[in-house]
Structure formats: structure tokens, C-alpha cells
Amino acid sequence: MKGENIRVSLGRKEILHGVDFDAEPGKVTAIIGPNGSGKSTLLKALSGEIESSGKVALNGRDISELKPWQLAAMRGVLPQSSTVAFPFSVLEIVRLGLANGLAAGDDTLPSKALAHVDLAGFEHRSYQNLSGGEQQRVQLARVLTQVWAAKYHDKPKWLLLDEPVASLDIAHQFTVLGVARNFAAQGGGVVVVMHDLNLTALFADYVYVLSEGNVWGSGTPTAILNDKTMEQVYGIDLPINTLPKGQVPFILPQAMKHDLTV
Ligand SMILES: Nc1ncnc2c1ncn2[C@@H]1O[C@H](COP(=O)(O)OP(=O)(O)O)[C@@H](O)[C@H]1O
Ligand SMILES: [Mg+2]
């Protein structure tokens, strides 16, 4: 997936100022950056959900030339938050993944997808009565069902996920990021907006850092998660550590404790 010179304006304001972006199938590519830096806007531009100038190519095809059903067959999108206005059951939500203008998909996929996000047996629960984290996992099951059901088996499928672990407990953060890693291991592409830098360091192959609507930098987690990034992008003086085994960088906020008193 390739984005070239992506500009997005919302209202009278330009939100993204010419972003170049490249993600490879078989890899997990993370997008990080402070609140309001344009992460969700970039993901929406890459998914074709909002208008942008510049060019976005998915599997070598310009997305502006793809029909909605072709797009739906190639990539699934998990938005940052989803509101469901009707009293749907969990199964009804996940089954929406089968219905993206494609031929009737395999009806066993929704339950399989629910099992992947640790919600086996939740099919007949009411979506509205689930916790925020459970709802988020139901939405991921819907997206998985969509990409599994789609044709185009000769081309990589893509998952575009906006903060998929933001409201999850630590075990389910690993469940969901494990789903993303497995998807990539099987040849799919994953583009994921991440909030948690430590999880990003653990799970991402490559990281884009956004700042005020521009790409500030990009690189492997080890290369890009460093003291300079913390200071210049996040504006905090917080040194990055690394674990001896495998050299995975990590940030320990405990070092900031002395700054928390008012
Ligand atoms: N529909 C909109 N109209 C105007 N401004 C918007 C709209 N959506 C987002 N923005 C602004 O664009 C900037 C980037 O937003 P967003 O991409 O959601 O940031 P992030 O996901 O990195 O937190 C923010 O300053 C936000 O206020
Ligand atoms: Mg966002």
C-alpha cells in the first residue's frame, strides 16, 4: 500500500500536508503520534473513506479507480469508535462483514472470527450490553469476516486498524495484536494506528511518526523510538530504555514521577 503526497482538508483547515506512506504486505506497519497529529485522518485517506488529494495505491491499483465492492474485498477497516444505533446481536454485527456487496460468504466465518478475538459463544448476546472492549473486539471480528469472505485470493488483503487495543485489558491487547501479527505472517498487510508506544515497539515491524499533519520520521521501532522522538514529537524529556534481550525499546513513565506534583 502506497500513499503519495496525501493532503486532506476538513472544513477550511488542511489536516494532512502532503504525506508519503509505504506499507508492505507481510508486515505490521504502525502509525503513532500525539493526539490530533492526523493519525485517524491518514488511515481514513488510505482506506478511501475520505477525500484526499495525492494518490493512494492498494496492491498496485489506484483506490479512486476501484469500485466500493472491490475496495471492500481488498481491505477491512476498523474505525477508532463505532456507534451502533439498533439493538443488534453480536452475530448480526459480525455478519455485516459477509454483506459488502459480495456474493454470499461462508456462514461459518463469523463464529470463527469471534473465536479469534476471544468471544466464542457471544453470538447471541446483545451488542449494546457489552463492555467497550468487548464491542471493539466484535467490530474486529466483523472486519476479519469481511476480509476472509472476500474474493481476490491472488492479492494480499489488508487490515486498517485505528487504535484497536485502546480500550482492551492487557491480555486482550495481546490477543488482538496477535491477530494482526498472524494476519501479516500469512501474507496480509496490516496498518495500525497505535497509542501505546511499548506495544508498538513489541508488535510493529515499521513505524511512521506523525506530527502536526506531517510524517516526522519513520523506521523500525528500534531506530525511531528514541529520546529525540520523545522530546521533539511528544515534548517530554523521557529517556528510552532497551531490554537487553532482543533490544526492544521501552518507555518507563516512572521516571517522570517527580513532575507530577502540582
Ligand atoms: N471533521 C473534522 N473537521 C475539522 N477538523 C477535524 C475533523 N476531524 C479531525 N479534525 C482535526 O484534524 C486533526 C487531526 O485529527 P485526527 O486525525 O483525528 O488525529 P489523531 O487520530 O492523530 O488523534 C485534529 O486537529 C482534529 O481536531
Ligand atoms: Mg485518532
Image (cartoon, grey):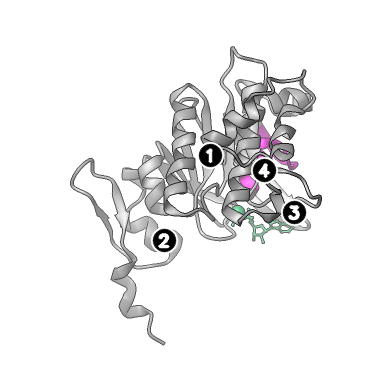
State the CA–CA distance, disc 2 to disc 3. 26 Å
Q: Closest to the observer: 52 or 97?
A: 97
Label 3 CA crowd tier, 10 Å (few <14, some 14–19, many 20+): few
What span is colored magenta in the figure?
41-55
Lower position in the chain sequence, tag 2 or tag 3 = 3
The residue identified by callout 1 is 117
Secondary structure under the numbered disc 4 in the rendered image:
helix
Instruction: Identify the amino acid type marked 2.
Output: Gln
Between label 1 and label 3, give the one nearer the viewer: 1
- Ligand 1 lies under 8 Å from the Cβ of mark 4: yes
Which mark's residue is nearer the viewer, 4 or 3? 4
Q: Earlier in the sequence, mark 1 or mark 3?
A: 3
Q: Answer yes or no: do the residues labelled 4 and 3 have beta carbons within 8 Å?
A: no
Chain-order first, disc 4 or disc 2: 4
Does the numbered disc 3 mark a residue whose Cβ is under 8 Å from ligand 1? Answer: yes
Instruction: Give the residue at mark 4.
Output: 44
Name the residue that disc number 3 marks: 10
Q: Position of residue 6 (x, y in %)?
A: 64, 41
Residue 149 screen position, x and y as percent: 66, 22
Residue 112, image x and y in percent?
58, 29
The reply to whether discs 4 and 2 touch (Cβ–Cβ < 8 Å) is: no
